Image (cartoon, grey):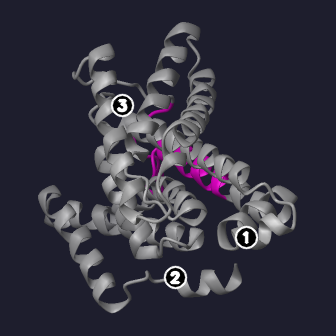
């Protein structure tokens, strides 16, 4: 039982990271109907900036802030400089541009910093706390859950309670009507890219201390799992991203703990296949679309 509780706790912590990164993919999809395959490479650029700031200032917190800001700037540059020119007539245009961007960014990072894994220490202990003698989450896992859920709640408030959020939703779901009402659709799409890239960079920064370390490909697997989460939850559904992220995180943790780490990706792939066969649009897509 102790082992199950521990695996469940670590699975939920990992799932919040998947959900946060998947939310970045959902935001881009809702705004532009583009699957941003460059999200992992873009996020790692922000992480490199954050690690550099941490090294210069000696403060993890300044590094965390720098990661989010750098991620937002990367999103701005990519949208204005590359993805804005994707043809709306061809769904593959944006995908091809994003894949090309992955190659360029990872090559530039490799030239600048090398391909070796650079260890990134966590700001808190990763030894699990015990509640009633049962090991549960570590202090760093608690920190990850609080930050990830806090940011997702803030984005929810932004989209539901503010004029900017209303304009973002209008530009995403009815761009022609939004233009007639005076909404600057192009600017709203840029804001969506900035928010998504900042969220993805934060997720990558939180994930790096628990992985092998920082290198240009450090977010590749995070992107793969987050993409799975976004598809399972529904590419139009922020709420689905959260629930699917927690589900995938728990499944991976339990399979790793009881059957072995090599079977965890197989279990996630099986979950993805089952969802695509039963409900291709995602488990929560229809409900979210109605509410939007």
Residue marked by disc 2: 284
Q: Nearer the viewer, mark 2 or mark 1?
A: 1
Estimate how packed mark 3 is, as few (under 14), some (14 to 19) or many (20 or more) residues with alpha carbons within 10 Å. Answer: some
Label 1: element kind: helix
Residue at the disc numbered 1: 176
Q: Is residue 116 left or right of residue 108?
A: left
Distance from disc 2 to disc 1, alpha carbons, whole Å, reads: 26 Å
Calculate the distance from the C-alpha at mark 3 to the C-alpha at mark 2. 33 Å
Contact between marks 2 and 1 (CB within 8 A): the answer is no
At 22% across and 67% down in the image, what residue appears?
255
Which region is colored magenta?
124-152
Residue 13, placed above or below residue 8: above
Q: Nearer the viewer, residue 252 or 178?
A: 178
Q: Earlier in the sequence, mark 2 or mark 1?
A: 1
User: Mark 3 sits on what residue?
Assistant: 105
Residue 112, percent from left and from top = 33, 14
């Amino acid at each position: 039982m102790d082992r199950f509780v521990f695996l469940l706790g670590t699975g939920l912590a990992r799932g919040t990271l998947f959900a946060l990164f998947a939310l970045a993919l959902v935001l881009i999809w809702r705004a532009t109907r583009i699957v941003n395959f460059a999200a992992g490479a873009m996020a790692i650029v922000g992480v490199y900036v954050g690690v550099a700031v941490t090294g210069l200032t000696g403060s993890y917190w300044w590094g965390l802030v720098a990661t989010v800001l750098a991620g937002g700037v990367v999103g701005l540059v990519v949208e204005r400089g590359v993805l804005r020119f994707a043809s709306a007539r061809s769904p593959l245009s944006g995908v091809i541009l994003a894949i090309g961007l992955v190659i360029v960014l990872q090559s530039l990072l490799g030239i600048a910093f090398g391909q070796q894994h650079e260890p990134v220490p966590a700001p808190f202990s990763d030894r699990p706390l015990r509640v009633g003698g049962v090991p549960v989450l570590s202090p760093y896992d608690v920190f990850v859950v609080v930050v990830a859920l806090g940011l997702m709640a803030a984005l929810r408030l932004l989209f539901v309670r503010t004029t900017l959020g209303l304009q973002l939703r209008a530009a995403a779901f009815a761009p022609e009507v939004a233009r007639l009402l005076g909404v600057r659709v192009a600017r709203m799409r840029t804001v969506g890219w900035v928010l998504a890239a900042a969220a993805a960079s934060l997720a990558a920064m939180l994930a790096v201390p628990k992985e092998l370390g920082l290198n240009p490909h450090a977010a590749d697997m995070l992107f793969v799992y987050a993409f799975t989460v976004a598809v399972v939850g529904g590419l139009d559904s922020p709420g689905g991203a959260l629930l699917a992220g927690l589900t995938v995180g728990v499944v991976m943790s339990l399979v790793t703990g009881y059957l072995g780490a090599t079977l965890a990706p197989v279990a996630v792939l099986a979950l993805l296949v089952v969802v695509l066969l039963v409900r291709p649009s995602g488990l929560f897509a229809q409900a979210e679309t109605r509410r939007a």
